Amino acid sequence: MSEQGRARGVTRRQALGIGGALGLTAVTGLSTAAGLARRPPVTGDELRSAVPLPPAFQVPLPIPAVLAPVGTSGGADRYEITQREAAVEILPGIRTPMWTYGGTFPGPTIESRRGRPITVRHRNELPVPTVVHLHGGRTPASADGYPTDLVLPEGWPDAARTGHGGHGMGGHGMHDPRAAVTRLTRDYAFPLDQRPTLLWYHDHRMDFTGPAIWRGLAGLHIVRDDAEDALGLPAGRRELPLMIADRVFAADGRLDYPALDPSLRERPGVRGAFLAGVLGDVILVNGAPWPVHEVDAARYRLRILNASNARHYELEAVTGDGRRLDLVQVGADQGLLAAPVTHRLLPMAPAERYDVIVDFAGVPVGGRVRVVNRLGSGRTRDVMAFRVARKDTDKSRIPRVLSRDLPAWRRSDAARVREISFRAGRMHGGHGWLIDGKPFDPARTDVTVRLGEVEVWRLVADVHHPVHLHLVGFRVLARGGGRPLPHDAGLKDTVSLRPGESVEIITRFDGYRGRFLFHCHNAEHEDMGMMANLEIV
Protein backbone atom coordinates (compact mmCIF):
# COMPACT_ATOMS: atom_id res chain seq x y z
CA MET A 1 0.00 0.00 0.00
CA SER A 2 1.21 3.51 -0.79
CA GLU A 3 2.15 6.11 1.85
CA GLN A 4 -1.03 7.93 0.87
CA GLY A 5 -3.07 4.82 1.62
CA ARG A 6 -1.39 4.30 4.99
CA ALA A 7 -1.96 7.90 5.93
CA ARG A 8 -5.66 7.57 5.25
CA GLY A 9 -5.92 4.24 7.02
CA VAL A 10 -7.54 2.66 3.96
CA THR A 11 -7.18 -1.08 3.50
CA ARG A 12 -7.25 -2.78 0.14
CA ARG A 13 -10.73 -4.15 0.91
CA GLN A 14 -12.08 -0.74 1.93
CA ALA A 15 -10.66 0.92 -1.16
CA LEU A 16 -12.30 -1.64 -3.41
CA GLY A 17 -15.59 -0.91 -1.70
CA ILE A 18 -15.36 2.87 -1.81
CA GLY A 19 -14.19 2.98 -5.40
CA GLY A 20 -12.47 5.28 -7.82
CA ALA A 21 -14.95 8.14 -7.50
CA LEU A 22 -13.35 8.97 -4.16
CA GLY A 23 -9.92 8.94 -5.75
CA LEU A 24 -8.93 5.64 -4.15
CA THR A 25 -8.16 3.55 -7.21
CA ALA A 26 -4.60 4.78 -6.95
CA VAL A 27 -4.43 3.20 -3.51
CA THR A 28 -5.55 -0.18 -4.81
CA GLY A 29 -3.52 -0.01 -8.01
CA LEU A 30 -6.68 -0.70 -10.03
CA SER A 31 -7.12 2.03 -12.58
CA THR A 32 -9.66 0.47 -14.91
CA ALA A 33 -13.21 -0.77 -14.70
CA ALA A 34 -12.03 -4.09 -16.08
CA GLY A 35 -9.59 -4.40 -13.20
CA LEU A 36 -12.35 -3.77 -10.70
CA ALA A 37 -14.71 -6.20 -12.42
CA ARG A 38 -12.24 -9.06 -11.93
CA ARG A 39 -12.31 -8.55 -8.17
CA PRO A 40 -14.80 -10.33 -5.89
CA PRO A 41 -17.79 -8.33 -4.66
CA VAL A 42 -16.21 -6.82 -1.56
CA THR A 43 -18.41 -3.91 -0.56
CA GLY A 44 -17.32 -3.07 2.94
CA ASP A 45 -15.29 -4.26 5.87
CA GLU A 46 -15.95 -7.07 8.32
CA LEU A 47 -16.53 -6.69 12.03
CA ARG A 48 -15.42 -9.53 14.33
CA SER A 49 -17.50 -10.93 17.16
CA ALA A 50 -16.13 -10.66 20.70
CA VAL A 51 -18.16 -13.60 22.06
CA PRO A 52 -17.42 -17.32 21.54
CA LEU A 53 -19.34 -18.56 18.51
CA PRO A 54 -21.07 -21.95 18.25
CA PRO A 55 -19.89 -24.65 15.85
CA ALA A 56 -21.65 -24.86 12.53
CA PHE A 57 -24.59 -27.15 11.87
CA GLN A 58 -25.64 -27.65 15.50
CA VAL A 59 -28.61 -25.27 15.85
CA PRO A 60 -31.90 -26.42 14.27
CA LEU A 61 -33.26 -24.19 11.52
CA PRO A 62 -36.18 -22.12 12.87
CA ILE A 63 -39.18 -21.52 10.62
CA PRO A 64 -40.74 -18.06 11.23
CA ALA A 65 -44.31 -18.28 12.50
CA VAL A 66 -47.10 -17.34 10.10
CA LEU A 67 -49.07 -14.36 11.40
CA ALA A 68 -52.81 -14.88 11.86
CA PRO A 69 -55.14 -12.04 10.81
CA VAL A 70 -56.99 -10.22 13.58
CA GLY A 71 -59.95 -9.74 11.27
CA THR A 72 -61.31 -11.00 7.96
CA SER A 73 -64.21 -9.23 6.33
CA GLY A 74 -65.28 -7.71 3.03
CA GLY A 75 -62.76 -9.72 1.04
CA ALA A 76 -59.78 -8.29 2.96
CA ASP A 77 -57.62 -9.34 5.91
CA ARG A 78 -56.36 -7.20 8.79
CA TYR A 79 -53.11 -7.79 10.67
CA GLU A 80 -51.44 -6.10 13.62
CA ILE A 81 -47.71 -5.98 14.38
CA THR A 82 -46.06 -4.23 17.34
CA GLN A 83 -42.52 -3.02 16.81
CA ARG A 84 -40.77 -3.47 20.14
CA GLU A 85 -37.52 -4.26 21.86
CA ALA A 86 -37.06 -7.89 22.88
CA ALA A 87 -34.31 -10.19 24.12
CA VAL A 88 -33.93 -12.94 21.50
CA GLU A 89 -31.80 -16.08 21.71
CA ILE A 90 -29.69 -16.01 18.55
CA LEU A 91 -26.49 -17.61 19.85
CA PRO A 92 -27.21 -20.62 22.08
CA GLY A 93 -27.60 -19.63 25.72
CA ILE A 94 -27.22 -15.88 25.05
CA ARG A 95 -30.04 -13.33 25.03
CA THR A 96 -29.47 -10.56 22.49
CA PRO A 97 -31.46 -7.29 22.74
CA MET A 98 -33.04 -6.59 19.36
CA TRP A 99 -35.58 -4.34 17.69
CA THR A 100 -38.29 -6.66 16.47
CA TYR A 101 -41.58 -7.03 14.66
CA GLY A 102 -43.72 -8.79 17.24
CA GLY A 103 -40.87 -9.88 19.49
CA THR A 104 -39.13 -12.25 17.07
CA PHE A 105 -36.31 -12.17 14.53
CA PRO A 106 -37.16 -12.51 11.73
CA GLY A 107 -40.57 -10.98 12.24
CA PRO A 108 -43.67 -13.10 11.63
CA THR A 109 -44.35 -14.22 8.08
CA ILE A 110 -47.49 -12.91 6.38
CA GLU A 111 -49.08 -15.26 3.85
CA SER A 112 -51.59 -13.70 1.47
CA ARG A 113 -53.47 -14.46 -1.71
CA ARG A 114 -53.08 -12.64 -5.00
CA GLY A 115 -55.72 -9.95 -5.38
CA ARG A 116 -56.96 -10.20 -1.79
CA PRO A 117 -56.04 -6.89 -0.11
CA ILE A 118 -54.67 -6.72 3.41
CA THR A 119 -54.09 -3.97 5.95
CA VAL A 120 -51.25 -4.19 8.46
CA ARG A 121 -51.42 -1.90 11.47
CA HIS A 122 -47.92 -1.26 12.80
CA ARG A 123 -47.54 0.08 16.33
CA ASN A 124 -44.18 1.68 17.13
CA GLU A 125 -42.99 1.03 20.68
CA LEU A 126 -39.32 1.49 19.78
CA PRO A 127 -37.26 4.50 20.94
CA VAL A 128 -36.98 6.02 17.43
CA PRO A 129 -39.27 6.73 14.45
CA THR A 130 -39.80 3.91 11.99
CA VAL A 131 -41.08 3.36 8.44
CA VAL A 132 -42.27 0.06 6.93
CA HIS A 133 -41.59 -0.83 3.29
CA LEU A 134 -42.99 -3.98 1.67
CA HIS A 135 -40.08 -4.74 -0.63
CA GLY A 136 -41.32 -5.92 -4.01
CA GLY A 137 -44.91 -4.94 -3.31
CA ARG A 138 -47.09 -3.26 -5.93
CA THR A 139 -48.20 -0.72 -3.38
CA PRO A 140 -49.73 2.78 -3.64
CA ALA A 141 -47.37 5.58 -2.68
CA SER A 142 -49.31 6.26 0.51
CA ALA A 143 -48.35 2.84 1.90
CA ASP A 144 -45.01 2.25 0.16
CA GLY A 145 -42.91 3.30 3.13
CA TYR A 146 -41.36 6.51 1.86
CA PRO A 147 -38.35 7.30 4.11
CA THR A 148 -39.90 10.41 5.67
CA ASP A 149 -43.40 8.95 6.19
CA LEU A 150 -42.54 8.25 9.80
CA VAL A 151 -44.37 6.55 12.62
CA LEU A 152 -43.27 8.48 15.70
CA PRO A 153 -42.99 6.80 19.10
CA GLU A 154 -44.61 8.27 22.17
CA GLY A 155 -42.70 11.29 23.43
CA TRP A 156 -40.93 12.03 20.14
CA PRO A 157 -41.07 15.72 19.09
CA ASP A 158 -43.72 16.60 16.54
CA ALA A 159 -42.62 16.93 12.92
CA ALA A 160 -43.54 20.62 12.98
CA ARG A 161 -41.10 21.22 15.83
CA THR A 162 -38.19 19.42 14.21
CA GLY A 163 -38.84 20.71 10.71
CA HIS A 164 -37.51 17.46 9.26
CA GLY A 165 -40.53 15.23 8.93
CA GLY A 166 -40.05 13.97 12.46
CA HIS A 167 -36.33 13.41 13.03
CA GLY A 168 -33.05 15.15 12.52
CA MET A 169 -32.15 13.37 9.26
CA GLY A 170 -28.58 13.79 10.33
CA GLY A 171 -26.20 15.14 7.72
CA HIS A 172 -29.00 15.58 5.19
CA GLY A 173 -30.84 18.06 7.41
CA MET A 174 -33.65 18.35 4.87
CA HIS A 175 -37.27 19.36 5.17
CA ASP A 176 -39.84 17.26 3.31
CA PRO A 177 -43.15 19.12 2.87
CA ARG A 178 -44.81 15.96 1.51
CA ALA A 179 -43.98 13.75 4.49
CA ALA A 180 -46.98 11.91 5.97
CA VAL A 181 -46.15 11.49 9.64
CA THR A 182 -48.27 9.61 12.19
CA ARG A 183 -47.82 8.97 15.89
CA LEU A 184 -47.62 5.51 17.44
CA THR A 185 -49.56 3.61 14.75
CA ARG A 186 -49.99 3.51 10.99
CA ASP A 187 -52.19 1.36 8.78
CA TYR A 188 -50.40 0.10 5.65
CA ALA A 189 -52.86 -1.01 2.95
CA PHE A 190 -51.50 -3.52 0.42
CA PRO A 191 -53.73 -4.38 -2.57
CA LEU A 192 -51.52 -7.39 -3.49
CA ASP A 193 -52.67 -7.30 -7.10
CA GLN A 194 -49.45 -8.97 -8.20
CA ARG A 195 -47.86 -12.23 -9.20
CA PRO A 196 -47.26 -14.78 -6.43
CA THR A 197 -43.78 -14.43 -4.98
CA LEU A 198 -41.66 -13.96 -1.87
CA LEU A 199 -41.61 -10.36 -0.63
CA TRP A 200 -40.09 -9.00 2.56
CA TYR A 201 -40.86 -6.08 4.83
CA HIS A 202 -38.27 -3.96 6.59
CA ASP A 203 -37.60 -0.57 8.08
CA HIS A 204 -36.94 2.23 5.57
CA ARG A 205 -36.34 5.30 7.75
CA MET A 206 -34.23 7.93 6.03
CA ASP A 207 -30.53 7.75 6.95
CA PHE A 208 -31.00 4.83 9.36
CA THR A 209 -32.25 1.89 7.27
CA GLY A 210 -29.01 -0.08 7.66
CA PRO A 211 -28.76 -0.12 11.46
CA ALA A 212 -32.52 -0.65 11.88
CA ILE A 213 -32.49 -3.78 9.70
CA TRP A 214 -29.29 -4.91 11.44
CA ARG A 215 -31.05 -4.66 14.81
CA GLY A 216 -33.84 -6.92 13.61
CA LEU A 217 -36.52 -5.05 11.67
CA ALA A 218 -37.10 -7.53 8.83
CA GLY A 219 -39.71 -10.18 8.04
CA LEU A 220 -41.08 -12.26 5.17
CA HIS A 221 -44.30 -11.93 3.16
CA ILE A 222 -45.42 -14.65 0.75
CA VAL A 223 -48.04 -14.05 -1.95
CA ARG A 224 -49.76 -17.16 -3.35
CA ASP A 225 -52.36 -17.93 -6.02
CA ASP A 226 -54.31 -20.90 -7.37
CA ALA A 227 -52.28 -21.26 -10.58
CA GLU A 228 -49.01 -21.61 -8.67
CA ASP A 229 -50.60 -24.02 -6.19
CA ALA A 230 -51.62 -26.26 -9.09
CA LEU A 231 -48.09 -26.64 -10.49
CA GLY A 232 -47.14 -29.43 -8.10
CA LEU A 233 -43.98 -27.78 -6.74
CA PRO A 234 -42.79 -28.97 -3.32
CA ALA A 235 -45.12 -27.62 -0.64
CA GLY A 236 -45.97 -27.84 3.04
CA ARG A 237 -42.96 -28.82 5.14
CA ARG A 238 -40.96 -29.22 1.92
CA GLU A 239 -41.21 -25.50 1.21
CA LEU A 240 -38.67 -23.58 3.30
CA PRO A 241 -38.32 -19.79 3.57
CA LEU A 242 -34.66 -18.94 4.16
CA MET A 243 -33.68 -15.41 5.24
CA ILE A 244 -29.88 -15.20 5.10
CA ALA A 245 -28.19 -12.37 7.00
CA ASP A 246 -24.82 -11.71 8.59
CA ARG A 247 -24.37 -10.16 12.04
CA VAL A 248 -21.69 -9.48 14.69
CA PHE A 249 -21.91 -9.92 18.46
CA ALA A 250 -20.25 -7.86 21.18
CA ALA A 251 -18.81 -9.44 24.32
CA ASP A 252 -22.10 -8.96 26.22
CA GLY A 253 -24.12 -10.69 23.47
CA ARG A 254 -25.46 -7.50 21.95
CA LEU A 255 -25.36 -6.90 18.22
CA ASP A 256 -22.36 -4.81 17.24
CA TYR A 257 -22.71 -2.13 14.55
CA PRO A 258 -20.29 0.75 13.83
CA ALA A 259 -22.90 3.55 14.01
CA LEU A 260 -21.64 7.08 14.61
CA ASP A 261 -24.69 7.56 16.86
CA PRO A 262 -25.54 4.25 18.60
CA SER A 263 -28.89 5.69 19.72
CA LEU A 264 -29.85 6.08 16.02
CA ARG A 265 -31.55 9.35 16.87
CA GLU A 266 -29.64 12.18 15.18
CA ARG A 267 -26.31 11.53 13.50
CA PRO A 268 -26.42 8.97 10.65
CA GLY A 269 -23.53 7.05 9.18
CA VAL A 270 -20.86 4.56 10.16
CA ARG A 271 -17.19 4.72 11.11
CA GLY A 272 -14.85 5.30 8.20
CA ALA A 273 -13.67 1.72 7.76
CA PHE A 274 -17.27 0.67 7.02
CA LEU A 275 -18.30 3.40 4.57
CA ALA A 276 -18.68 0.85 1.78
CA GLY A 277 -20.83 -1.51 3.85
CA VAL A 278 -20.95 -3.46 7.11
CA LEU A 279 -20.14 -7.18 7.01
CA GLY A 280 -20.59 -9.59 9.89
CA ASP A 281 -18.69 -12.75 10.80
CA VAL A 282 -21.78 -14.80 11.79
CA ILE A 283 -24.09 -16.14 9.08
CA LEU A 284 -27.68 -16.43 10.25
CA VAL A 285 -30.50 -18.25 8.49
CA ASN A 286 -33.94 -17.40 9.87
CA GLY A 287 -32.14 -15.89 12.84
CA ALA A 288 -30.05 -18.99 13.70
CA PRO A 289 -26.24 -19.26 13.30
CA TRP A 290 -25.17 -21.82 10.65
CA PRO A 291 -28.29 -23.97 11.25
CA VAL A 292 -29.06 -27.53 10.21
CA HIS A 293 -32.37 -28.89 8.96
CA GLU A 294 -33.51 -32.50 8.65
CA VAL A 295 -35.02 -33.35 5.27
CA ASP A 296 -36.49 -36.31 3.44
CA ALA A 297 -34.73 -37.77 0.42
CA ALA A 298 -37.00 -35.70 -1.80
CA ARG A 299 -37.34 -32.35 -3.56
CA TYR A 300 -37.50 -29.17 -1.46
CA ARG A 301 -38.47 -25.67 -2.48
CA LEU A 302 -36.13 -23.08 -0.96
CA ARG A 303 -37.44 -19.49 -0.92
CA ILE A 304 -34.15 -17.63 -0.37
CA LEU A 305 -33.73 -13.97 0.59
CA ASN A 306 -30.40 -12.20 1.04
CA ALA A 307 -31.33 -9.84 3.90
CA SER A 308 -27.73 -8.81 4.58
CA ASN A 309 -26.84 -5.13 4.62
CA ALA A 310 -23.88 -5.43 2.26
CA ARG A 311 -22.71 -9.04 1.97
CA HIS A 312 -22.89 -10.83 -1.37
CA TYR A 313 -23.19 -14.61 -1.59
CA GLU A 314 -22.41 -17.21 -4.22
CA LEU A 315 -24.30 -20.26 -3.02
CA GLU A 316 -23.71 -23.90 -3.83
CA ALA A 317 -25.08 -27.10 -2.29
CA VAL A 318 -22.31 -29.65 -1.70
CA THR A 319 -22.73 -33.27 -0.58
CA GLY A 320 -20.39 -35.04 1.84
CA ASP A 321 -18.51 -36.65 -1.05
CA GLY A 322 -18.00 -33.32 -2.82
CA ARG A 323 -20.80 -33.46 -5.40
CA ARG A 324 -22.63 -30.23 -6.20
CA LEU A 325 -26.40 -30.56 -6.33
CA ASP A 326 -28.39 -28.70 -8.97
CA LEU A 327 -30.12 -25.53 -7.86
CA VAL A 328 -33.15 -25.44 -10.14
CA GLN A 329 -34.45 -21.89 -10.19
CA VAL A 330 -38.22 -21.61 -10.63
CA GLY A 331 -38.71 -18.00 -9.52
CA ALA A 332 -37.06 -14.61 -9.12
CA ASP A 333 -37.82 -11.46 -7.11
CA GLN A 334 -41.21 -10.95 -8.77
CA GLY A 335 -42.41 -14.51 -9.11
CA LEU A 336 -42.24 -17.57 -11.32
CA LEU A 337 -39.98 -17.83 -14.35
CA ALA A 338 -41.37 -18.89 -17.70
CA ALA A 339 -39.32 -22.11 -17.45
CA PRO A 340 -36.83 -23.55 -14.94
CA VAL A 341 -33.16 -22.54 -15.06
CA THR A 342 -30.55 -24.89 -13.58
CA HIS A 343 -27.55 -23.49 -11.68
CA ARG A 344 -24.63 -25.00 -9.82
CA LEU A 345 -23.65 -21.62 -8.33
CA LEU A 346 -26.18 -18.93 -7.43
CA PRO A 347 -24.93 -15.37 -6.85
CA MET A 348 -27.10 -13.26 -4.53
CA ALA A 349 -26.76 -9.54 -3.84
CA PRO A 350 -28.47 -7.83 -0.90
CA ALA A 351 -32.31 -7.86 -1.21
CA GLU A 352 -32.40 -10.37 -4.08
CA ARG A 353 -34.70 -13.39 -3.77
CA TYR A 354 -34.42 -16.72 -5.54
CA ASP A 355 -36.95 -19.54 -5.60
CA VAL A 356 -35.05 -22.81 -6.14
CA ILE A 357 -35.70 -26.54 -6.00
CA VAL A 358 -33.08 -28.88 -4.54
CA ASP A 359 -33.51 -32.65 -4.88
CA PHE A 360 -32.05 -34.67 -1.99
CA ALA A 361 -33.17 -38.03 -3.49
CA GLY A 362 -29.62 -38.98 -4.47
CA VAL A 363 -28.16 -38.33 -1.01
CA PRO A 364 -27.97 -41.40 1.26
CA VAL A 365 -29.89 -41.39 4.51
CA GLY A 366 -27.61 -39.90 7.14
CA GLY A 367 -25.78 -37.84 4.53
CA ARG A 368 -25.25 -34.12 4.83
CA VAL A 369 -25.51 -31.34 2.25
CA ARG A 370 -23.73 -28.09 3.07
CA VAL A 371 -24.85 -24.78 1.63
CA VAL A 372 -21.61 -22.91 1.02
CA ASN A 373 -20.89 -19.28 0.20
CA ARG A 374 -17.99 -19.33 -2.21
CA LEU A 375 -17.41 -15.62 -1.63
CA GLY A 376 -16.93 -16.15 2.10
CA SER A 377 -13.81 -17.07 4.01
CA GLY A 378 -13.32 -18.76 7.36
CA ARG A 379 -16.61 -19.04 9.22
CA THR A 380 -18.48 -16.99 6.60
CA ARG A 381 -17.91 -19.67 3.97
CA ASP A 382 -20.55 -21.88 5.59
CA VAL A 383 -24.24 -20.90 5.47
CA MET A 384 -26.27 -23.91 6.67
CA ALA A 385 -26.65 -27.65 6.18
CA PHE A 386 -29.32 -30.23 5.44
CA ARG A 387 -29.23 -33.72 6.95
CA VAL A 388 -31.11 -36.40 5.04
CA ALA A 389 -33.09 -38.24 7.72
CA ARG A 390 -35.29 -40.69 5.83
CA LYS A 391 -36.61 -42.02 2.54
CA ASP A 392 -40.12 -40.92 1.65
CA THR A 393 -42.49 -40.66 -1.29
CA ASP A 394 -42.28 -37.52 -3.39
CA LYS A 395 -45.22 -36.50 -5.56
CA SER A 396 -43.83 -33.07 -6.40
CA ARG A 397 -42.69 -32.09 -9.88
CA ILE A 398 -40.95 -29.29 -11.74
CA PRO A 399 -43.05 -28.42 -14.81
CA ARG A 400 -41.26 -27.44 -18.00
CA VAL A 401 -43.60 -24.43 -18.23
CA LEU A 402 -43.97 -22.51 -14.99
CA SER A 403 -45.75 -19.33 -16.03
CA ARG A 404 -47.29 -17.78 -19.13
CA ASP A 405 -48.03 -14.33 -17.68
CA LEU A 406 -44.59 -12.74 -17.85
CA PRO A 407 -44.66 -9.36 -19.63
CA ALA A 408 -43.29 -9.36 -23.17
CA TRP A 409 -41.90 -5.81 -23.28
CA ARG A 410 -39.61 -5.11 -26.23
CA ARG A 411 -36.95 -2.48 -26.59
CA SER A 412 -39.00 -0.95 -29.39
CA ASP A 413 -41.85 -0.38 -26.89
CA ALA A 414 -39.74 2.01 -24.84
CA ALA A 415 -40.78 5.66 -24.81
CA ARG A 416 -37.23 6.60 -23.81
CA VAL A 417 -33.86 5.27 -22.71
CA ARG A 418 -32.22 6.74 -19.61
CA GLU A 419 -28.69 6.31 -18.31
CA ILE A 420 -28.33 6.49 -14.54
CA SER A 421 -25.01 6.29 -12.70
CA PHE A 422 -24.31 4.86 -9.24
CA ARG A 423 -20.97 6.14 -7.98
CA ALA A 424 -19.15 7.25 -4.85
CA GLY A 425 -18.53 10.93 -4.34
CA ARG A 426 -18.50 13.82 -1.90
CA MET A 427 -21.59 14.67 0.13
CA HIS A 428 -21.86 17.49 2.66
CA GLY A 429 -18.09 17.65 3.01
CA GLY A 430 -17.63 13.89 3.52
CA HIS A 431 -17.83 10.58 1.74
CA GLY A 432 -21.14 9.70 0.11
CA TRP A 433 -22.78 7.47 -2.44
CA LEU A 434 -24.50 9.30 -5.28
CA ILE A 435 -26.98 8.71 -8.09
CA ASP A 436 -26.14 10.82 -11.15
CA GLY A 437 -23.75 12.80 -8.97
CA LYS A 438 -26.38 13.81 -6.39
CA PRO A 439 -27.17 12.63 -2.87
CA PHE A 440 -30.77 11.90 -1.95
CA ASP A 441 -33.05 14.87 -1.34
CA PRO A 442 -36.70 14.13 -0.50
CA ALA A 443 -37.72 17.56 -1.81
CA ARG A 444 -36.26 16.97 -5.29
CA THR A 445 -37.82 14.96 -8.12
CA ASP A 446 -35.08 13.07 -9.95
CA VAL A 447 -37.00 11.11 -12.59
CA THR A 448 -40.53 11.70 -13.87
CA VAL A 449 -42.30 9.01 -15.90
CA ARG A 450 -45.82 8.69 -17.27
CA LEU A 451 -48.14 6.03 -15.90
CA GLY A 452 -48.25 3.09 -18.27
CA GLU A 453 -45.16 3.97 -20.31
CA VAL A 454 -42.33 1.52 -20.99
CA GLU A 455 -38.76 2.69 -20.47
CA VAL A 456 -35.28 1.22 -20.77
CA TRP A 457 -32.81 2.22 -18.04
CA ARG A 458 -29.07 1.76 -18.47
CA LEU A 459 -27.61 1.50 -14.96
CA VAL A 460 -23.88 2.20 -14.61
CA ALA A 461 -21.79 1.31 -11.54
CA ASP A 462 -18.38 2.12 -10.13
CA VAL A 463 -18.35 -0.76 -7.61
CA HIS A 464 -20.95 -3.36 -6.62
CA HIS A 465 -24.42 -1.87 -6.25
CA PRO A 466 -27.64 -3.91 -5.92
CA VAL A 467 -30.18 -1.51 -7.43
CA HIS A 468 -33.83 -1.75 -6.34
CA LEU A 469 -36.86 -0.10 -7.97
CA HIS A 470 -39.97 0.37 -5.88
CA LEU A 471 -43.44 -0.51 -7.25
CA VAL A 472 -42.42 -2.17 -10.53
CA GLY A 473 -40.75 -5.35 -11.68
CA PHE A 474 -38.32 -5.32 -14.60
CA ARG A 475 -36.49 -7.60 -17.01
CA VAL A 476 -32.74 -7.53 -17.51
CA LEU A 477 -32.02 -6.90 -21.20
CA ALA A 478 -28.23 -6.82 -21.23
CA ARG A 479 -25.05 -6.77 -19.14
CA GLY A 480 -22.05 -4.84 -20.39
CA GLY A 481 -23.54 -4.80 -23.86
CA GLY A 482 -23.87 -8.59 -23.89
CA ARG A 483 -26.51 -11.07 -22.94
CA PRO A 484 -27.97 -11.28 -19.42
CA LEU A 485 -26.52 -13.90 -17.10
CA PRO A 486 -28.51 -17.07 -16.32
CA HIS A 487 -29.48 -15.79 -12.85
CA ASP A 488 -30.96 -12.63 -14.43
CA ALA A 489 -33.94 -14.65 -15.69
CA GLY A 490 -37.50 -13.67 -14.93
CA LEU A 491 -39.06 -10.55 -13.47
CA LYS A 492 -36.88 -8.81 -10.91
CA ASP A 493 -37.03 -5.76 -8.66
CA THR A 494 -33.36 -5.78 -7.59
CA VAL A 495 -30.39 -6.23 -9.90
CA SER A 496 -26.74 -6.60 -8.94
CA LEU A 497 -24.42 -4.23 -10.80
CA ARG A 498 -20.80 -5.37 -10.85
CA PRO A 499 -17.81 -2.99 -10.81
CA GLY A 500 -17.51 -0.93 -13.96
CA GLU A 501 -20.56 -2.60 -15.46
CA SER A 502 -23.64 -1.27 -17.22
CA VAL A 503 -26.89 -3.22 -17.00
CA GLU A 504 -29.94 -2.48 -19.14
CA ILE A 505 -33.39 -3.13 -17.71
CA ILE A 506 -36.86 -2.65 -19.18
CA THR A 507 -40.11 -2.04 -17.31
CA ARG A 508 -43.58 -0.57 -17.57
CA PHE A 509 -44.41 2.03 -14.95
CA ASP A 510 -47.94 0.92 -14.24
CA GLY A 511 -49.93 0.45 -11.08
CA TYR A 512 -50.11 3.80 -9.28
CA ARG A 513 -49.25 7.45 -9.60
CA GLY A 514 -47.22 9.18 -6.94
CA ARG A 515 -43.76 9.45 -5.43
CA PHE A 516 -41.65 6.31 -5.29
CA LEU A 517 -37.95 5.49 -5.00
CA PHE A 518 -35.06 3.72 -6.62
CA HIS A 519 -31.85 3.14 -4.70
CA CYS A 520 -28.88 0.95 -3.96
CA HIS A 521 -29.80 -1.83 -1.51
CA ASN A 522 -26.40 -1.93 0.07
CA ALA A 523 -27.97 -0.43 3.18
CA GLU A 524 -24.94 1.69 4.07
CA HIS A 525 -24.81 3.13 0.54
CA GLU A 526 -28.54 3.89 0.76
CA ASP A 527 -28.15 5.65 4.11
CA MET A 528 -25.30 7.75 2.75
CA GLY A 529 -27.23 9.23 -0.15
CA MET A 530 -27.60 6.56 -2.86
CA MET A 531 -31.35 6.95 -3.30
CA ALA A 532 -33.46 8.96 -5.75
CA ASN A 533 -37.07 10.01 -6.26
CA LEU A 534 -39.24 8.55 -9.01
CA GLU A 535 -42.42 10.48 -9.76
CA ILE A 536 -45.11 8.63 -11.73
CA VAL A 537 -47.64 11.07 -13.25
Image (cartoon, helix red, strand yellow):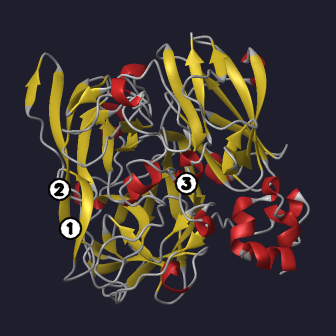
Q: Nearer the viewer, residue 339 or 23?
A: 23
Residue bearing the label numbered 2: 103
Label total for image = 3
Distance from Cα at disc 3 to Cα at disc 1: 24 Å
Q: Position of residue 61 (x, y in %)?
A: 27, 71
Instruction: From the image, state whether disc 2 or disc 3 is nearer to you.
Output: 3
Residue 364's quadrant in the figure? Answer: bottom left
* Residue 192 shows up from this direction: no
Crowdedness near tag 3: few (<14), some (14–19) or many (≥20) residues, C-alpha within 10 Å: many
Q: Position of residue 523 (x, y in %)?
A: 52, 52
Regarding mark 3 in the picture, which secondary structure is present there?
helix
Figure check: 46 above or below 272: below
Q: For the residue marked with disc 3, what is the amino acid?
A: Glu
Instruction: From the image, state whether disc 3 or disc 1 is nearer to you.
Output: 3
- Numbered label attached to residue 524: 3
- Numbered label attached to residue 38: none
Q: For the residue marked with disc 1, what is the amino acid?
A: Val
Residue bearing the label numbered 1: 88
Q: For the residue marked with disc 2, what is the amino acid?
A: Gly
* Residue 382 shows up from this direction: yes
Distance from Cα at disc 2 to Cα at disc 1: 8 Å
> In the displayed structure, does residue 84 sit left or right of residue 433?
left
Crowdedness near tag 2: few (<14), some (14–19) or many (≥20) residues, C-alpha within 10 Å: some
Figure check: 530 above or below 536: below
